[in-house]
Image: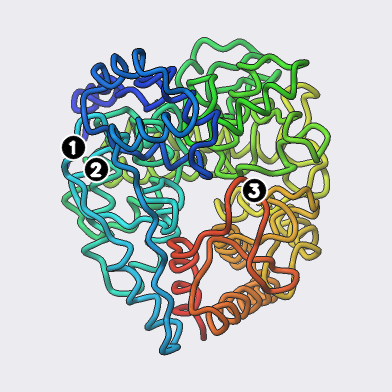
Amino acid sequence: MRYGLLALSTVLVAASPAPRSPAQLFGPLYKAVQMRGLFPDSKTFADATPKRPAKAILADYAKCRCDAEPALRQFVETNFTIPTTPAARASTERLTLTVHIDALWPQLTRTQTTVPAGSSALTLPKRYVVPGGRFREMYYWDSYFTLLGVQRSGRQDLVEDMVVDFGNLIDRYGHIPNGTRTYYLSRSQPPVFYLIAGLSRDPKTLANRTRQLRAEHAFWMAGADTLKPGQQSRRAVRLLDGALLNRYWDDRADPRDESYREDAELADRTPSRSRGELFRDLRAAAESGWDFSSRWLADGRTLATIRTTRFAPVDLNSLMVGMEQAIAANCRTLGDTACATSYAARATARTAAIRKHLWNGRFFADYDLDTNRANDFASAAMAFPLFAKVATPDQAKATATALRPFVGEGGLRTTLIGSGQQWDDPNGWAPLQWVSIEGLRGYGETALADQITMAWLASVDREYQASGKLLEKYDVVERKPGGGGEYPNQDGFGWTNGVTRALMAGRP
């Protein structure tokens, strides 16, 4: 089959205009509700559904003089349907962990082909799996790790549905948002659609999936063609030697709808920083998935010093190599030699740049755009070049050595810094376990990979035996529920279920 240049003229078609988020729709009312802390979790009102058109609600709000409680609460309850968060169903029978996880997928599966007017939810054409807890919608990078388990549970039908859902988002918006809410549309997440699409077993959809992958690649590289050495534009960065890399970004520079009060209060406490710059860096960290971590903090401790947009991250650029290689391979299969050659060249150039610029002599690290070198901050992100098979054998061996101090009794911790943020010591997260295990195995470091596998499974099983639940994150030093961050540890939980199920299926 020929997938020529003419057919690819649709790759960069204009996406649909993004619908406005709740903060944009309801302006002063939204600010009043969030800043007064009407709900303990800022995400609650972001997910609320208006009962009437926004214009009518705002007209009444302008006349009601109800900024203070209890009048404000009464106004909100009259005009909005407030979401609830059902508790995850804990296993009281203590089924085997495999049986329990297989039974969770139907509980976490949703369908949303229509939404009420004014809702922040985005429609999807097919079924999808949510993480659980406060996370009521489909999330981007979570879903790849969730689908690893869905597939091993024999639910290929659900895998194919979610591949269609993600492709549909690209077709509508030009990229995959952080999650399926209007307030997430200004950012994406680590670009794992090439991995999600690779789980499909339907060869008839290959051309369509490849077109969507190319559109996603164009989203990440927007503005790259006009960059001079040392310049950045949105998510694209050009280093001083001309190498092209990427960074995390967000197209908005205001408080996040789902953390409005937290962001606004932080800005109020940080008068020395531009509010827009601070909000952008907070939002970019949310795009990274590591929200939040000392990895992004200038002083390693204080959220006010966040500078996410000033790094070319090692995980993001490793995944971009994977995307470029996947597009090249797909194009070869589809008979489009020009496409295959172009993307293979991009992947080769980026691989060389990672090996040169994101290697600090001891391990892979983020490239600091202000100092023009890889920093010395050690994190589990150093495993991504191994996962994407970007590292040289010597670099992989050194990385394995650098990762060993991260391994606790319960798995791989995220960093060695105990900042109180959730993407820091002592927390371990399912996606980083999978990436490190697969990366290490790919370079023959099987002993360390097996150690992490068994430690993680023991941590998950210990908590399951204690509470009957699987959690969002774990303290892998003491093998107990993780903590820190902006919200309590959530149960459910999509990517923990997926990675655990996949690792158990891979046992000898």
Q: Is residue 117 left or right of residue 139?
A: left
Q: Is residue 192 left or right of residue 268?
A: left
Q: Is disc 2 surrounded by few (<14), some (14 to 19) or many (20+) residues within 10 Å?
A: some
N-terminal of the pair, mark 3 or mark 1, is 1
Residue, disc 2: 334
Residue, disc 1: 2
Viewer-proximal residue among 89 and 278 = 89
Instruction: Name the secondary structure under disc 2.
Output: loop
In the image, residue 246 above or below residue 88: above
Measured from the top left, where is residue 120 in percent x and y? 32, 34
Residue type for callout 2: Leu
> Which quadrant of the figure has residue 143?
bottom left
Q: Measure the C-alpha gap from mark 2 to mark 1.
A: 6 Å
Residue, disc 3: 485
Measured from the top left, where is residue 384 in percent x and y? 61, 51
* Residue contact at pointers 3 and 1, CB within 8 angstroms: no
Quadrant in which the N terminus is drawn: top left
- Image point (74%, 24%), residue name: 269
- Image point (25%, 16%), residue name: 55
Instruction: Name the secondary structure under disc 3.
Output: loop
